[in-house]
Structure formats: C-alpha cells, structure tokens
Amino acid sequence: MIIGIDDTDSRNGMCTTYLCAVLLDELKAYGSIIGLPLLMRLNPTIPYKTRGNASVAINIDTDQPQKVIDHVISSIGSMAEMVSENTNPGVAFVPDNDVERTKQALCEFFRSAVTDVLTIDDAKELACELDIPHKCFKNGRGLIGALAACGAMLDCDWDHTYEYIAYREQNVWGTLRSVDNTSLHKADIETYPSTWDTVDCANDLIVCVPRSPDPVLFGIRGKSVDDVTRAAGLIESEPIERSVVYRTNQGTDMHLIPATNISDIKEMHSYIIEGTVSKTPETIQGGHVILSIRDSKGDEIDCAAYEPTKNFRALVRKLIENDKIVVYGSVSENTLNIEKIQIRSLAAKSESQNPVCPSCGKRMKSAGVGQGYRCKKCKTTANSAVSIELNRELEVGLYEVPPSARRHLAKPLVRFDLQEWGLFPSR
C-alpha cells in the first residue's frame, strides 16, 4: 500500500516529514516498509503553502491494510497543527492491487502538482473517480499533495536527490537549536560537491539548519544515501530523537517549464525563457534589482533578483541592454523571480574618451566647445573624442543564486555538466 500525506504543519510548528518519520517506525507493527520514503516538493508559487510546500509518501507491504489506514488517520488527527487556519491535512491510500488501474492518472497528477495550479476539487474528483481511499481534514487541501506523492511513488521516471533529516527531541521544540557551526563547515568541505546547501560560504550563512519552530534539527542534501549520511555523521549537535533519509525531487528543476514566448507565461508557474536585456538593471527600494527582457516578438517581462539573493545581485547589475540571456524562475505579480541566469552573449560596451597624443602618449585636453582636442605640450590636435571598448568583467556561462536564497526545487550548478557551460561553481 502507498500512503500519501500532506499539509499537517503550520508556520508555528510541526512538519509533515516528522509525522512521516514517526509513522515509519510505528507502521512496522503492521508490515514492512518498502524502499525509502519520498519527500516531494510541489509548485513553489502556491500561496496556500505553509513553508516548503512538501508532501510525503510511504510504501508498506502489509496484510493488515485497514489497521494501517486507521493508525495513519489517527496519527494525523493527533499530530497535525489543526488549530492553524491554514493547516488542512489530507491522506490517500493506494492499495497494491489497484496500482495498475491508478498509475497513469496519479503520475500525471503528480507532474501537474509540481508545475501547475491544482484545486481541492481536482484532487477530490480524482480520488473519487479512481476510488482511492482517502481522508480530508477541514477543507482537505492536503489531499492535492497526498495524491501527488502517491503518483510520485508510482512514477519512476523523474530525476531525484536525497535528504538526510535529523529531528529534535520534543522537549526542546521551539527553542534555539544547538548545532556546531564548525562541524557544519567541516561536513560541507569534506563532502561537497556530493552534498550541497549545507552552508553558504560566500555569505557566511548556515543553510541546513532551519529557524522556524518545527522539529527539524538539520537537513543534508546530496546525490546519494551514502553521501548525505556521511555528511550528517560529521555534524556535532544537540541530541537527535530520530533521523530519516528521503528520496526527493529537490534540486531537480522539475518545476520549470520551457517557454518559447513571454506571452505563454502565466502567474504562479515557473519557466525557462530566453530573451534580450531590454532595460538596464535598476536597484529599487529594499535592495532588489530589476531588469527587463524582450523576446523575439517584442514582448517584455520584468525579472527580479531580490535582496535575499545577496551577491548574485552584483552579477545582475553588470548586465546591459542587448545582452542575450536565459532566465530560470517563478512568476508572481508579472515578475519572474530569478533562480538562475545563463548568459549566452554579451553586447559591446564602450565609452567616449579624450584622444591620445601621438607624440607624447598623454591624453589631449578639450580645446573648447566645438573646437576639438589639443595637446598643450606637443601642440598636436584632434577633431573628436575616441570610442573605447570596455572590459565587461562578465563571462558567458550559467550562474545561480547563493545557497541561502535557493528554492528547494532549484537545481544547483553542482548537478549540471558544467563543462558543457564552460564554467565551474565558485565557493
């Protein structure tokens, strides 16, 4: 049986992955857990999300399906943050004997939940159409993620990474976390690039330790179970209640949709779109940097490097009109939130300078308005200034926001074939 769960947390506490971690232990009383649990990130632009818009799935081999269903529903009822207005859990159960009948529809639903905007009615109608046992708490919005997670468990054809999540003992939830920063840097140094987003070296920030009052102590992301487990073993911290390694779609760019034209772009979706810089980047109040790109049809869209992207903004400020770029990111309020930029070609940039005296090699001075230039020493003259091409201090290549600003789904450069792009990630 596949079990999908979503929306049990709130901004004030709990975590759906923690509920999953508890169930992984408790459900062993009814059977055997098959493979790793899934941690699936869904469309990051959805306004109803609590924190990371994640759902989970467990696959269990059991001959006591009703006891499993009853236990899971009871656990959600007792552990979820029901007092929060925005917490609306949902759970779905896909029996093994029903997998072939439901697989295609659930897989399509999963992919749509990552890239598109689905409604509660969409989820309820699908569950009823496929006769999938499910339970909705309150308005049941979590059923969307629950069904999507089930679809992910049935769909083997998606890129994946892993995350090791360590959980705090319950008596310290909501208090300041105790994780040794030196050990975090050591873990990063010894396992990067097989792990990533542990620390943000350029901005001297810890990334893998959350600041919200939930049960997570830290999370290590990487390319294999061994890599994340090894890194986690190097970290010194307060006591850990339990830990789980999840297979996940984090760091895959699964949310991005290739778009040919800006007119194809819709709100609350994420895209890869090519264009020409049509307006020199401008820094606005709050430190956000805004630039505009134009497609081949002449349509334009604003793209933003917001303040949390820190040093990435300096790169964006170096772009000028007529640079050819590809932007990756999500659209909200008609603005694309930049996650990565591929610079394809750079426009020439020049400035006007006084001409050089051919005799002494020094810059000539203006002889007056409309009178050209003259070298006072050599008495040589020139009719006009000269145009000098400037070094752009920028190279063609693929660039990303720092780890501290990276979305869960955004694919880091360490996962690209960087030789194809002609650059290597900086630390």
Image (cartoon, grey):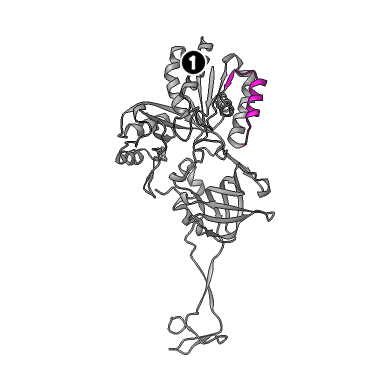
SS class, disc 1: helix
- Residue 14: x and y in percent read 44, 30
Q: Furthest residue to the right?
A: 297
Q: Furthest residue to the bottom?
A: 379
Q: Horizontally, is 288 left or right of 265 in the view? A: left
Classify the position of the N terminus by image quarter: top right
Q: Nearer the viewer, residue 93 or 47?
A: 47
Q: How many numbered discs sit on the rendered protein?
A: 1
Question: Is 412 located above or below residue 42 in the figure?
Answer: below
Residue positioned 31% across, 32% down in the render: 238
- Residue 110: x and y in percent read 59, 29
Question: Is 300 located above or below residue 88 in the figure?
Answer: below
Q: Nearer the viewer, residue 85 or 289?
A: 85
Q: Horizontally, is 97 left or right of 197 in the view? A: right
- Residue 269: x and y in percent read 61, 41
Q: Which residue is tagged 1?
A: 71
Q: Which three-letter amino acid code belongs to the residue tagged 1? A: His
Q: Is residue 328 magenta?
A: no
Question: Is 349 located above or below residue 11 in the figure?
Answer: below
Count residues near mark 1 (Cα–Cα under 10 Å), then give few for <14, some for 14-19, many for 20+.
Answer: some
Q: Furthest residue to the top?
A: 63
Question: Is 298 located above or below residue 257 in the figure?
Answer: below
Q: Nearer the viewer, residue 427 or 79?
A: 79
Q: Which residues are magenta?
A: 116-135
Q: Nearer the viewer, residue 152 or 354?
A: 152
- Residue 29: x and y in percent read 43, 12
